[in-house]
Structure formats: structure tokens, C-alpha cells
Image (cartoon, rainbow, N blue to C red):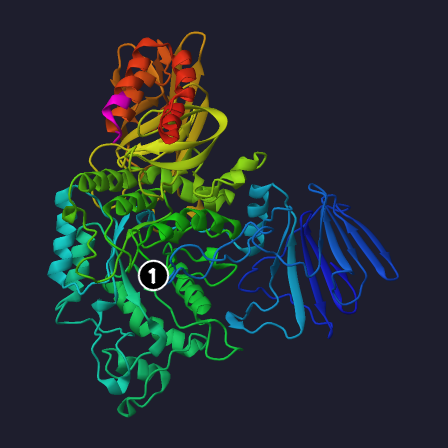
Amino acid sequence: MITGNKYRISVLTDRIIRLEYSESGSFEDRPTFAVVDRSFWEKEGSYSLRDEEGLLQVDTGELLLTYDKKPFSSFGLSIEVRSTGKKWNYGDSYGFWTNLGGTARTLDDVDGRIRLEDGIFGRDGYAVIDDSKTPVLENGEFVGALEDHIDIYFFGYGKDYYAGLRDFCRLCGNMPMVPRYALGNWWSRYYKYTEESYMKVVDSFAKEGIPLSVAVIDMDWHVTEVDPKYGTGWTGYTWNKDMFPDYKRFLRRLHENKLAVTLNLHPADGIRAFEDMYGDIAKELGIDSKSKAPAEFDFGDKAFRDAYFKCVMHPYEKDGVDFWWIDWQQGTGKKASDVDPLLLLNHYHYEDQEKRNLRPMIFSRYAGVGSHRYPVGFSGDSHATWKSLNFQPYFTSTASNIGYGMWSHDIGGHMLGDKDLERLVRWIQYGVFSPVMRIHSSSSAFFNKEPWNLEEPYRSIVKKFMVLRHRMIPYLYTENHRGYAESKPLIRPMYYDYSGEAESYNVLNQYGFGDSLLVCAITEPEDRELKLACSRGYIPKGRWYDIFNGYIYEGPKVRKFYRELSELPVLLKAGGIVPLTEGECQNGTDNPSNLCILVGAGADGSYTLYEDDGCSMNYRRGEYVETQFATRYDAEVHRITFTISAAKGEGRLIPSKRSYKLKLIGAVAEGYEFDKNAGATIVEVGEVDVSGDVTVEIEGVELLSNDYMEQGFRILERAWINTETKDVIYDKMLHLDKATFGIWLRQADISEKLKDAFYEIGV
């Protein structure tokens, strides 16, 4: 720290500098909601200091700070980022084109795009987070920040995004692991369910062969019709016995179906005299129950909080509620000086579970910098429109710039809009490849998303993708742990890994999905002539495969991906590995006995599967298991060698024996089953003991190329264009070699979109 009479400058790393100014000379050492640990250290001599009358210069090697020791001003305080040569001056505005964006409190009633709050990265290599007004934590309680105190953090990480996130998480707290069940399919609807009607939905999903992991019960679980003298029924804590005559039985039935349970809360009106637990609450808080005075909601009051958890939350959790949907919609407080109730609800609900060695999880809105410590985020009631769908992939990936990696959206949209089953399918596909897959909608009798209520082919496609979501849980959970251990979120803007490519900043709806996959969300309707929808994406250097149709790409290049409704562009790199559950998926998210390993053929690679009990904090004590997979490609001898290493760690947490199947995408090998639709060779390894190493050698491997004849025929057959035009194109395909056909195609008087679909398959 470099301290003057009214300023204090703290060099936290060579790329983070804290800047404080106070006319009273008072500085903040307490943690805030945003910043929890400033105890960074750098080796002695890691920065140089020039301190003269009216001039202070700090050189960290990466940053050069110049300060005139006066009140902070644009001409007296600046920091230069050495990696970009750009200079920040205090007071600079950070508009859309400078800051790469963070996230927002909510998407409530949003139809399309909104302005995002700032993140920790900028196009010029820097960003600033203002912590001046953030509530401070003192003796376990949040209080207002110091008056007349400027407190900002300068992040100057250039394009080193992962280093920036690692240090952000050192400063502001780790990205926590969520319970394993959070990564499966959630069912949710704002609807007046009864016990039997909700169980009928659960049974219908089972009959449909679609697994679930979380049952969401919106606000109608509690009494909503109350005497007007108490106000509205929006807030409630007493089960509606007409709908749920034995709520404990209902919760048991959900758990017997291997479902975690969450209930919706609107806590703003406190606990009123009609509630079942009012007498207990009144006694705890010293309220005369005969007066029927409400226990006013005040989460800044420890006495109220303690009574709330003791008399309401804990008894219901004992009965079977696993976590709470905190649906706070009442703003940031009654007075300007109030601490935001949303912030308090998120912090203390999460802390309450953590103290009991439960894997904490809440379901709530974003409350500002630091909120990444309290997953999962509820993005609010968005419109059911293409515009809303088009914004969500960008919104979700950009939130990683503030460490917020666990947004959950109302998949399909919550309200308004119109009926569009194509859009619903595309939204569900996006949901499957997003942090949380939660279908939700309003109570309208015409807003039905239950798969069995959809006509074909929509019904089958929805099932295909929802089953895939549960199959991906081994991969998703490993990436969930990677966020905690390495500060690398599941959803990553393309520029995180390909920052040297300008196009990586312009493919807004493409993102990294963990370490092995790239996803291009399709957020626009299909072309009327092609009967294909498209999404624009960047293909990085190397060989890549679409895991759905086996299309093969060589990068680097930017292009549009054209897909029928049953497909989504999801690319696996050569050497990439993705572990999936094999076989029939059922409710719940247990560590599986059967695994299918996707392998991108044509390069070496490795992947370490992470597993633990999925529900406690014991992983922090080292109670987990890791299994490494490795693939080696030898082009000279046409061989792929795949190794499954012995499981390391607490072996009791996983099955003692496992069956493995390898799916080698982009390669064919004689003597093995070949999946033509996926362009993949299937290798059955069989059951093995997890305590030993297993090596499989696949000989006679040949890498595939796109079959443009067959793929081109499918494009033509699907298109709604003149049949004579189809015949002309197909005749050229049959009688010209590929290169000559490509030349003819470029000159042909046909749709440019049709041409582009052919270019995608390598013509």
C-alpha cells in the first residue's frame, strides 16, 4: 500500500490496482459484498515506485500508474496498460464499445436486448469496478459503505482473460460448485397445480422417457387468497391444503422420484397473522400474537433472520424442500441508505446452507458484483419471442466477464409472444447447452410446453435434446468443478480462447461450452426456401466435428452453419473428449455405471472426469474421484490408442465397475460398427474395474472427409425450390468433379443461401 493523507493505492497484482480517495483520510479494510479478500501478495521488488512532490508513479511491469496526489481527476490520475499501449484516465466513461460487458439484475419484461453492467475486461485491455457504495460486512452484518470515499479497482489484463478471472476470484471469491442435481432438467410452470396434477406431470415425463432432476413449484404452493386486511397473497408461507392436503407426502413422492424440490418465495410482506407459523415467529420476535401485528420483513435485522430460518425455512427443509426460489421483485430498499434486500437474501440463504455442510444453492436474481458466489441466477420473466431468444446466448456468455457463470432462463419464454413450436425447440436446444436447463412459462391455458402436448416432429426432437442434457451430466459436472478449481466458467465468450482473432469478438451467439465443445445457438427461424436455419460462427484453427451430423471443418474461418430443426451446431475439436452417460437415463443424477466417451479423431488429447457425492461440502476435504481419459492418434500406422486410467481418490463414490463405449467422431475403422448419421466409429469396451488402467487400440483408422454428394443431395431434397433447378444442380454434382462443380456453383444463377449451404460441406 502507498498511503498519503487522503489517498491510498494498493498494488494487488501486477494487473490489479486499488485506488482510494477520502477527504477525511478514512479508508476501507473490511470486506464488502463485492470484495472478500484483498490479501494478495507480490514478491519483493515486483513493482517500482517513484514518489516526489506532486508526482507518484507506480510501475508493476504490466501497468504504469501516474498520479498527482490531488483529488482524483482525469488529468491527474492515469494508468497505462503495457500490453495494449492504451491509457485510462480517471473518470473515463465505459460505454458499450469499450467495456466487454458483464451482466444485469434481471430480464424481467425484456423483449430483446438491454444494456449490461460492466465486467472486468475491456476492448482496450482494461476495466474499472467501482466498489465505493457497496455494502460492507462487519461482524457478520452488512452495513452501508463509508461516506465520501472513492474505492475503485483497475483491472488491466489485456487479452489474458483466464488470468483476469483467476485473480477476480481471488479478490471476490470462488465460483462455487452447485449440487449435481442442478445440472439436469428442471420442470417449472406458473400454474395452480395440485399434488395429483403435479405428480401426473412427473409420471408423464417418465412415460415419455425424459428424465428430470428438479421439481419447481411456483407460488401457488402457498395460500394466495387472503383477507384484504392483510394485503395481497403474493407473499405466503402456509401450504394451500386444498391443493396439497398432505404436503409432506407430496415432497416424499417427489424425492422418491429422485427429484430435488424448490419452492417459490416472494418474501417482501413478511410473516402475517394468518400464517401457520405466525405464533412461533411472534414468540421469537417478542410480538404479542393477539395483536396480529405482522413480523415485518427486514433481512438486515438478525433477529428477524434467525426467526425466519428457525421457524420457516428449516422446518420446511426438514420436510423435504431442497432449496428456495427467492423471487424478490421489490427493488433495492425503501430508503436510499438501505442495504439491497436482494443482496441480503442471497447472502444469508446461501450462508445458512453452507454452515450445515450442505452444498449451497439458491435460485435468485443478480445483486451486483460478487453475486457469482451465490448461484443459481434467475433471469426473470422474459417475453416468448425470437428477439428474447436471440439475446440470451450473448447475455449468458458475457456474464462470465463478471464471474457469473450460472444463469437460468425461462426456456421457451415466460409470457406474451405467440405460439411457435420451431422457436420453442430452438430455445430448448439452447437450454440444453446452457448452464441450467429449466423450462418455464406462465399459467395461460395456451402456453403448453409439456413434450407430450407437442405434435411431431417437435415432440421427438424435444425428447432427444432433454435426454441428451442428462447424458451430459458427467461432462457438465466436471466443468462445474473446473469453474471452482480453475475459475474457468462453463460458458465462455469465444474471445477467451481465441483472443488473437478479431472475429472471435463478433460471433455473439457462439460460445465455448466447457473445455471440449463450441456451440452456435440458432436463434432465428428457418429459411423458407432452404427449410434450414442458420447461425454464424468462428471455426478455430484445426479439425472440428459436429457431434450431431458428423460434418467436418478445417479452421480458421468464419462461416454460417445450416441446420434442420433436429440439429444444432456443436463442434468437438480433434483430440477433444466428452464423457456422457450411456444407456437409458432416469430421474436423478447419480454417478453412472455406463459411460459413452465422445472422441474427436485425428489428434492427441486428454480429459479428466471429476466426481464426488454431488450434495455436500466434503469435496473441500479432498473427498472426490478423478478418472483420466487420453487419446493418441498415430497417422503413420493409422491407429488410435485410448487409455482409461485407474480412478484416483475416494473410490467408494463411484461404481466399482463401469462399462465403456467409445464414439470416435470423424473416423472409420474396419471391423467396428459405424454410425453413418454421426460419422463415427463405435468401439464397445465393455465392463472394466475402475481401479485399474485400460488401454484400447483401434487399428486401420482412416479419417473421414465430408461426403458432399450425399450431404448435397440432402440439402436439395429438403429445399422448397423449383424441381428443375434441383435437377440441374444434381446433374452437375453427378457429372463434374468436386472442384469443377464448385466453380460452376459460384457462377450459377441460384440462391446465394443455397450456395452457402453447399460451401459449408466443403464444395
Magenta-highlighted residues: 719-726
* On screen, residue 659 above or below 218: above
The answer to whether 280 appears left or right of 628 in the picture is left
> Is residue 725 on the magenta stretch?
yes
* On screen, residue 11 above or below 428: below
Q: Residue at x 70, y 72 (%)?
A: 26
Q: Is residue 503 visible?
A: yes
* On screen, residue 358 above or below 219: above
Q: Which residue is mark 1?
A: 381
Q: Is residue 540 visible?
A: no
Q: Residue at x 37, y 68 (%)?
A: 328
> Is residue 600 on the magenta stretch?
no
Instruction: Characterize the local packing of mark 1: few (<14), some (14-19) or many (20 or more) Cα atoms within 10 angstroms.
Output: many
> In which quarter of the view is residue 303 placed?
bottom left
Residue 737's x, y, as percent? 37, 9
Q: Residue at x 31, y 19 (%)?
A: 729
Residue 193's x, y, as percent? 16, 63
The answer to whether 528 appears left or right of 93 in the picture is left
Residue furthest top in the image: 637
